[in-house]
Amino acid sequence: MKLSNSNCIGVDLTQSVPHIAVASGSAKVESSIPASSPPAALLPVLRGESIIAGAVAHTHRRGIGGNWPPECQVPVGGNFKNGTGRVPLVCAWTRLANLSSQTFSGVLGDTEVSWQPSGQIKLGALSEKIISDSVQAWEKKYHSKKTVVVVPDSLGEAAQQALIDNCGSFLIPRPIAVAMSWCRKNADKFSEAVTQSPRGATLGHLLVVTLTFDQWEVVPIEIRIMAYKEKIWLIPVRNRVAGGGEFPRLGVNFFLAMATSKEESLQGIWKNVFGSGLLTENIDNHSSNMNLFQSVRDCITDGFSSRVEDLFHKLDLWGEIFTDSIKLSPGMFQDHLSVIYRKQLSCLPENAHGRCLGVVLDGSCSYIQIAKNRSLGEFVAGAFKDQEIAICNGAEAARGAAITAFALEHNLPSYRETIIPIDIHYHGKNEQGDYVNAYKLLVEGTTVEAGKEYKSKEPVRGLYIKQGERNITLTLRRSSERDLYLFRKVTAEIPKPTTFDEEVKIVAHLRPGQGFANVFVDSVNENVFRTRLDWRTMGNCEEPPPPPLAYLPEVSRVVHDEYMWRDAEYYVKVAIRELRGGGANLEGAMRDLRNQGKFNQWPMADDYDVYRGQQPQGDIFRHYGVCPSDGDLDSVSSPSLMREFANECEKKFVNIRIRPSERKQLQQTASWMYLACPQVIIVNVRKNLKNNLALISQEDLHTIGLCWSKSDDISMFFNALDQRLRQGTIGVNNWLRACRNIVRFRDAALHVDIIGNGQLNKIVDRILKILERQVEEENFSIIFNNCILTCLYLLKRRRYDKDFLNNESPEYDRIDQILRGLLKKQSKNLNDRQCSIIKTTLKFLRKEASLKDLDSSVLTG
């Protein structure tokens, strides 16, 4: 290989031997294997000594598994506490991948590996330093100008950053590196689909299976095609939005298992794998040793040899090599490969699903023999039948890395990275004006060309550092899988405390796959401060709780329930017959429909779902009933039957021969159809309310509470309620129930356009007078409950007027004193349900409530 002083090289130290590739053109690459043993670095034997890495490490005696001197031994002096001075890089890669696999983490954890060369003094180095020094040693040997380093696909941001801080090289995920090599070899085959778009057009996907020395990977990769400088380019697109395609096997375990077919001792196995190139040479020569074949087949099934685990697990870092393995029969092994493939494929864009452009199996384990005429790569390929399959020996990733290095250096197309969106949490308002958990987009989900920097299109605004504080803590959200999120807290510190609430603007800069993003936090007012998020402060957290509630944020919704319909259907048919006939038992039929047919019941849906063994939806405002509260009869089990019932009710209601008692029973029942209640009943109630307040019946008030939804009607009701309360507070129980039901079911019932502040305050004042009298007389009956619940529901005015019943208003003090007094002095005279309602109302009054405070005592009371 001819070397210049400005080489673009790819370095792959994740195989059983180091692979170095040098690119002298966009697709012209020379590959080499500069050593015959697994990549390793040597820990210092004296304080201040540097790590020994690169070519020198492969020929050094330290930790080769010899008998003498002690420096050669594994472990030194036969004592596992002493460890060994040779660190196979597979152990360092595994440690970094495991510690950073919980993506979106700012803390890497303990990465040190150490030994005691003299049996007393511990000397060690960080895993990222061991790998970085190895990379730099090969860079120096190959006179690199631009280096791209192959890394496991699961390597998270914290580990990426640690490597970049130590060696500064560009990192490429291993499956993408393999795909880069394939793309350069196959670009001319797809000229029919070429496009001028800078992002390219999707061709399909390439399946990459990496059978490497560390964790294996099964990763389908979207492939795009584009034209650039009169050439056709295939562009891989990395997409790790929903986790990775890690397969539960590590290649090193196959090599160790094979060594046990020849060696018995730890020293012998170690020397056979890590101290010489003998085992690799045997693999290349397709050894026909039957014991070796069986050891490989056992490793397919078990993941690792139990004998090897017994010998090795006490060595520093080696315990992690024997974890996360599951037993798989040969058939299950291939099935599991297919399952991971399909799962990962579902995360790609839909236009990449249909066409598989090929399968590439690359890695040190590909040519390991499992039988005389069959390799491990051929066995794995059996999981992907009817596809064009290429089985390679582990050089493809280094080739792809070198190609990428040349592309980055000469501004040519390479690959694209899909960014996982990141949001910043804050408390905002929804469409109804209620404060809820909300998120501002910091990093959008898009693809970015490798090596290019992504910058937020617009800064995030609307967040503040409060007066006197020196830091701002943000809660970030990032998707982990579809509809699942990771939440993290991270802090930015500013030089000095703010003198007043200071608004900030936040912008992110990042290079995907190259460590942490730079997130700048600047004051909106110029030159007050500028700082960055400190990812070392990042910690796991749950999604922040929603803001405290000052009122019930939603309305109750009744949805049709098929099981309740089964109880009601017979009684609906009986009622229809009575409505059509002479009606001798019309009143009884209406009562039976409500009571036996459960027409007037509306239990909380989640409670019923749990009782029925079904999965609850977690919606406490959702109720089951025969008729839906939105009046949509198409949603019931038999729309035609319910419309027939409504039509017969309408005819009977206006029939001059109907008796008043029958009419009352009919109206009482038909009102439980909510917004589907016959219009003649609605019109009649409206006329009664306009003409004579004294003639309003309890049935009319029942209809108003359940069936009125128009703004003019609701405004008319509040005017009537105001008048009625001025006439006296005796006999107003049904008026209070109607008020509560209107607010319970109709979302904008307390809008300022419907009822003014003055009128609403007068209504509250008169309700409190009724409540005070009930407390004074120790009359804790229905009207007492209705007064408290009405106060609770009226707090929804705060959606439109944040100062309604605030802690400076006299009405606030009156309610607070009444409720606190009840709990303190009258709790023995109150039942559990009443105590629950009082406590809940107090929390909402004080703006300290949450949805957890709501139960059936409030929501169905």
Image (cartoon, grey):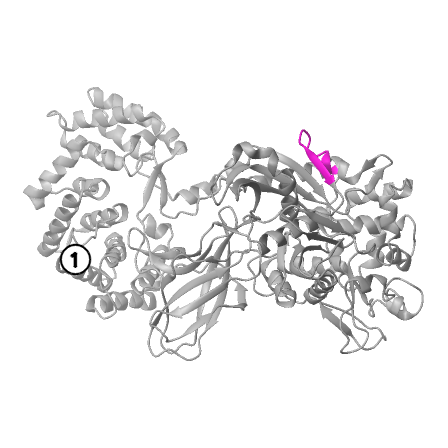
- Residue 297, by quadrant, is top right
Between 837 and 238, the one lying in front of the other is 238
Q: Which residue is label 1 attached to?
A: 760
Between 799 and 226, the one lying in front of the other is 226
Q: Which residues are magenta?
A: 380-391
Q: Against 31, is 188 above or below?
A: above
Can residue 591 be found in the magenta stretch?
no
Report the side of 214 relative to 559 (left or right).
right
- Relative image position of residue 527 (x, y in whole percent): 37, 75
- Residue 344, by quadrant, is top right
Can residue 384 be found in the magenta stretch?
yes
Q: Residue at x 94, y 68 (%)?
A: 68
From this viewpoint, is residue 311 visible? yes
Amino acid type, mark 1: Leu
- Residue situated furthest top in the rendering: 581
- Relative image position of residue 547 (x, y in whole percent): 37, 61
Q: Against 53, is 323 above or below?
A: above
